[in-house]
Amino acid sequence: MSRKYFGTDGIRGRAGLAPITPDFMMRLGYCAGKILSRADVAPPHRDRPAVLIGKDTRLSGYMLESALESGLSSAGVDTLLLGPMPTPAVAFLTRALRLSAGIMISASHNPFEDNGIKFFSADGMKLPDAVERDIESALDEPMTPPAPSAYGKATRVHDAEGRYLEFCKGTFPKQRSLRGLKLVVDCAHGASYRVGPRAFQELGAEVVTIGDRPNGVNINDRCGATSPGTVAAAVIEHKADFGIAFDGDGDRLAMADHDGRLFDGDQLLYAIVKHRQREGTLRGGVVGTLMTNFALERRLGELGVGFVRAKVGDRYVLEALLEKGWECGGENSGHLLCLDSHSTGDAIISALQVLAALVASGQTLGDLTRDLVLMPQVLVNVQLGAAFDFQSSPGVRAAVDAAKAELGDRGRVLLRPSGTEPVVRVMVEGEDRERVKRLAEAIAAAMRASSTPAAA
């Protein structure tokens, strides 16, 4: 069954428009409560199934929280309300409190007008596709609430921030501290605005906090991991050692060096892996995605570290890591996973893993990652009709084959359909920017020419 509502990271859309509406969320809460409390999905740890709800700082989060709580209660499920906390905190607390499931209300790095829902299983991991399909199937069935005496109740979790803070700090090496470092932490006016800065302060760093004044509509607004130039400028202004930027729900990371130079997820993942290999603590290889820079794959190969690519989306990186029995992986967007530390991507913990490498080496980010020279990537979006099959087009195949032949083993070509719009993303990377730009545009031109009615 094709999924109607769930994408690669839960359900997401414009708040107030289907499916991000109160009536749908109440029904979703009911159906999710029924499915997630099944014994084959979440073995019972309590007398009654219980689900944790967290949210970021979007104004629409209040509306969706109330609707989900109502739906879960009508399914006979207790609700524990967390308030504004990072997505990975929901994953951790779901597991720590022995709950049936966790729900995060967030649209991650999207603007405040959007919102969405992410689910976590009892073990703190993203829901399997099969469970999401079961929830979608249940949405087509009538609601049959239990007797009034079996309704669920809602309570607030008052010690959540302290629990999660200690968990994050526990992933930093106990023999080291951040004393002597000055950090700028950009919380994107999002879910990490309280707990994020505290993690670094309590490990000894001097912290300058920005993006910590959420008002319900300024989340991700010219700040955070999706606008890293803000933290880079603040690093220079405050003469800091490093800058750390989260996205709105706290699972994506960008960092800046002392001179304002920015580092993406590929570079930060490399810093972590390189340090672990030096320390002899690297378990297995590394999982990237189809968008991971080819230079990282090549450099890891030179170090004797295995590398595989998963589909775009941190859930697919996680699946590949579990299948391989490895621990480190991530996306160039800044979703990084260290499974010895957490079951999901966590920007605070990822930053602490990078800082552990920097403290141990005594180097700057630039020095530590100097031997990784990223290849230029050019991305062209091509609008196509839904009926056009670009993969079977001789003209497109010829352009792709020509590009691959010219690049040889010093570059890569990727054609990836968007999952949300009639667009194909043409990505070419190689050592020379002008060359890869020319090749990407040639493939895009062939695609447009082949899709026109005259060409057909």
Image (spheres, rainbow, N blue to C red):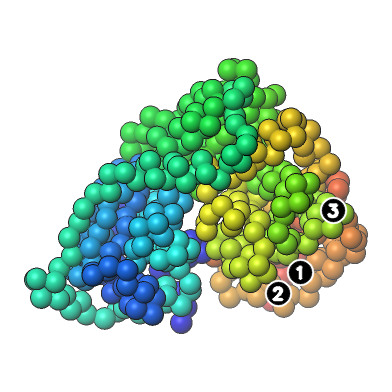
Query: From the viewer's perspective, is the residue at label 2 or at label 1 nearer?
Result: 2
For the residues labelled 2 and 1, say whether their Cβ atoms are less than 8 Å apart: yes
Residue 122, how many percent across, how many down?
40, 66
Q: Which residue is mark 2?
A: 391
Q: Quadrant of residue 324?
A: bottom right
In the foreground, 378 or 392: 378
**Residue at image location 63% in from the left, 34% down from the top:** 176
- How far apart are the alpha carbons under marks 3 and 2? 35 Å
Residue 416 drawn above or below residue 238: below
- Could you tell me the amino acid type at mark 2? Gln
Query: From the viewer's perspective, is the residue at label 1 or at label 3 nearer?
Result: 3
Q: Which residue is mark 1?
A: 396
Mark carried by residue 303: 3
- Judged from the image, the secondary structure of the residue bearing numbered disc 3 is loop
- Judged from the image, the secondary structure of the residue bearing numbered disc 2 is helix
- Could you tell me the amino acid type at mark 3? Leu
